[in-house]
Amino acid sequence: MQVGLLGLGTVGSGTVEVLRRNREEIARRAGRDIVVKAASARDLKKKRAVSLDGIELVADPAAIIARPDIDIVVELIGGDTIARELVLKAIAAGKHVVTANKALLAKHGTEIFLAAQKKGVMVAFEGAVAGGIPIIKAIREGLTANRIEWIAGIINGTCNYILSEMRDKGLPFDMVLAEAQRLGYAEADPAFDIEGIDAAHKLTILAAIAFGIPMQFDKAYVEGITRLTAIDIKYAEGLGYRIKLLGIAKRTDKGIELRVHPTLVPSRRLIANVEGVMNAVLVKGDAVGPTLFYGRGAGSEPTASAVVADLVDVTRMATADPEHRVPHLAFRPDRLSDVPILPMEAVESAYYLRLRALDRPGVLADVTRICADLSISIDAIFQKEAGEGEDQVDVVILTHATQEKHVNAAIHRIENLPTIPSPVVRIRLEELL
Amino acid sequence: MQVGLLGLGTVGSGTVEVLRRNREEIARRAGRDIVVKAASARDLKKKRAVSLDGIELVADPAAIIARPDIDIVVELIGGDTIARELVLKAIAAGKHVVTANKALLAKHGTEIFLAAQKKGVMVAFEGAVAGGIPIIKAIREGLTANRIEWIAGIINGTCNYILSEMRDKGLPFDMVLAEAQRLGYAEADPAFDIEGIDAAHKLTILAAIAFGIPMQFDKAYVEGITRLTAIDIKYAEGLGYRIKLLGIAKRTDKGIELRVHPTLVPSRRLIANVEGVMNAVLVKGDAVGPTLFYGRGAGSEPTASAVVADLVDVTRMATADPEHRVPHLAFRPDRLSDVPILPMEAVESAYYLRLRALDRPGVLADVTRICADLSISIDAIFQKEAGEGEDQVDVVILTHATQEKHVNAAIHRIENLPTIPSPVVRIRLEELL
């Protein structure tokens, strides 16, 4: 099987290295050799840590797609403009495609899979979600017996590293982000990660294969971790919770929830104990119950592990009747569901609310009255003692599950109280049971 | 696709129920209906919780195999005598087979897979290991890029439940076992579980697909949890460890380690926090690093989840050229490895040793001298204070990794010291890094 790589960056180099190092072992599994014949790179003269012996280097990725001796094109360029054109061109040329490009699939997956289906080629994308964790395969093939109820995933290692450090060391967000950038765990421009967009791309893909719906990235609710403070992490910890950036996709009677946001999770849950850059995806199926899949969500060889697993799968099925292949989105393309994605206002969650209140009698009565009027059921309420000489106290409220619009209304009213001088902090809370 | 069930016990009923409840969703994935046409049961008149509408019930499982309208035979009878005959008969009749029978595969897998290969049929067995966790698929297909270095699994829910309860409540083994039996978490005859045999069956299968070796259950080292005491669990906890019954398969330069035994694991590892009847398998690949797969390891619907996933896979590939199918043992049958299983004496591990010593000067000097003479490097040593009026103290030693034969020799010499009146407790310790 002859492979052409588009892009020789971190994952591309890792793919070359893993295929070379484990060549004999991989061939024992796949039944035939998988060999990289050509690769494209922006800088052809760059020194690389990995040996490129036997690989023809070219500047133009389209030249690789045009080669008749290439069976599989691996797209590792990233982004959703050039990558989209190249992937569609590869499909049109009758090549199978392997990609780790979540932005591309979350935005243009429907178009790409349709083109692939028409042409009878495969597009494999295990590396697009949670790096080396075989989560696409687990959901798409391992849990086929189940009606998936929900998925909750730590699917951005940068955010999980930052939140782990903020909790461990009690440091503020900005300081930890700077350290993460120094260590290479965060990009120079970190917005894509810390604003939750990367997680939303991955969640969009997971929701599609879990529920048999088209990719609908534009309907996902996305809230990052930039406004989280050390004090809320500390309060949460004291109440038996950890704060994680979760991607949550949930099936409800009214539609599908698709949301990325910081979330309080009970500390005793396994997923709450996933630390640093590690990823984990919790999948709840109606037959299997809760399952969790954990591993490295990024990096050269972990992602290459997923890319090469896709290469083995594609190699195995390349000459098979397309009828025998696993559908791209887990469900047959003619049997996708049009169940709607719920607007965030209609989502149900429990909430952690923190108010800074003037230390006056009657504040709690006012706040609890507002909640009661909006039928928000309070699970617990804590007033933190005012510091020496301080006139303000923190009040933390945990609610039972309620619709987001009611909580938004309550926050609006609470912020209008004369005893509440600053904005209410709202973080969603999920028991994940 | 028409299915015949051999056995209508817990898993058989679960399979009927899941296929019925999720029929539409499963068909959307598999592309065709999967229908149970017939089932065999010992007691045809028994009332069952699940509806058997449209399923022909027979007493003789062989009658199901003989039916020309059955495409896939699901063996859920258990044991390795009648089940072996039936599975071989089904293969000879050209039926695909799905089984959740770990004892059968661990002992007769080589014979069964050879017969299936010759006949061109599939034998799928996701339900045989770790119930609903798709661990066979993860290792066999999801991690194909990797040279698997080791696997460590909590793969017996009964033992994990007992150990969790002993730790949580400080209760002795016998009392927790009795409670587990009352709750249905342990069988009336629990030997199979608590002696580690069930875990060893599963480990044998995992090792085969991870390393590309034949099934070699008879070479596995098996030690159960019956001799564990609450005091060792407590001491381990104080040192930052939890005791789990682990199945460990490890590739070394000299051969493959295949062993089931109680193991101290650092408390901060995710797998150390897997509680109650849950299962988890930690897989270390050279490219992906550590990955963990967690879920329910037994029970009606969790195991049915795996059985039905196999049915979907088999349905998808039933008419495909066998060349396109995933090899039963992950590696091509003509390319299995003959690397030997190491005898336990040659295995390397770290150790927790607990000695009850007379409270005399010089005991520690004697013990550490014995270790030094055998080149056993001590990581830490703790002398517990003698209780009021007691003449004996507990000494706990943690060693660095060393060959088991040296530790056995040291224990023999230590037990011969006049100051050591009772046997030394030895529990292996793994950092799992």
Image: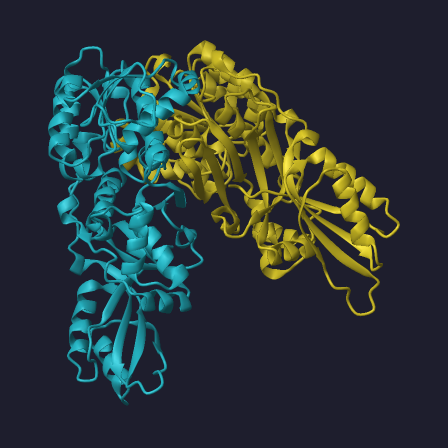
Chain colours: A cyan, B yellow
Instruction: Identify the residue at the far right of this view.
Output: B418
Asked if residue A164 is positioned above or below residue A312 in the image, the reply reads: below
**Residue at left 13%, top 46%?**
A218
Please tell me which residue lies in front, A55 or B96: A55
Q: Is residue B345 left or right of residue A313?
A: right
Position of the N terminus of chain A, as image quadrant, is top left
Instruction: Please provide percent x and percent y for residue B82.
Output: 59, 23
In this figure, what is the number of numbered marks? Answer: 0
Using the rendered image of the protein, determine whether residue A152 is visible from the camera's viewpoint: no
Res B169 quadrant in image: bottom right
Q: Is residue A366 left or right of residue A84?
A: right
Res A59 quadrant in image: top left
Instruction: Please provide percent x and percent y for residue B134.
Output: 42, 35
Asked if residue B212 is positioned above or below residue B290 in the image, the reply reads: above
**Residue at left 34%, top 41%?**
A297
Q: Is residue B174 left or right of residue B329?
A: right
Q: Is residue A282 left or right of residue A62?
A: right
Please tell me which residue lies in front, A81 or A343: A81
Instruction: Please provide percent x and percent y for residue B330.
Output: 44, 22
Instruction: Please provide percent x and percent y for residue A197.
Output: 20, 48
Res A353 quadrant in image: bottom left
Asked if residue B264 is positioned above or below residue A209 in the image, the reply reads: below
Using the rendered image of the protein, determine whether residue B408 is visible from the camera's viewpoint: yes
Instruction: Identify the residue at the far bottom of this view.
Output: A361
Position of the C terminus of chain A, as image quadrant, is bottom left
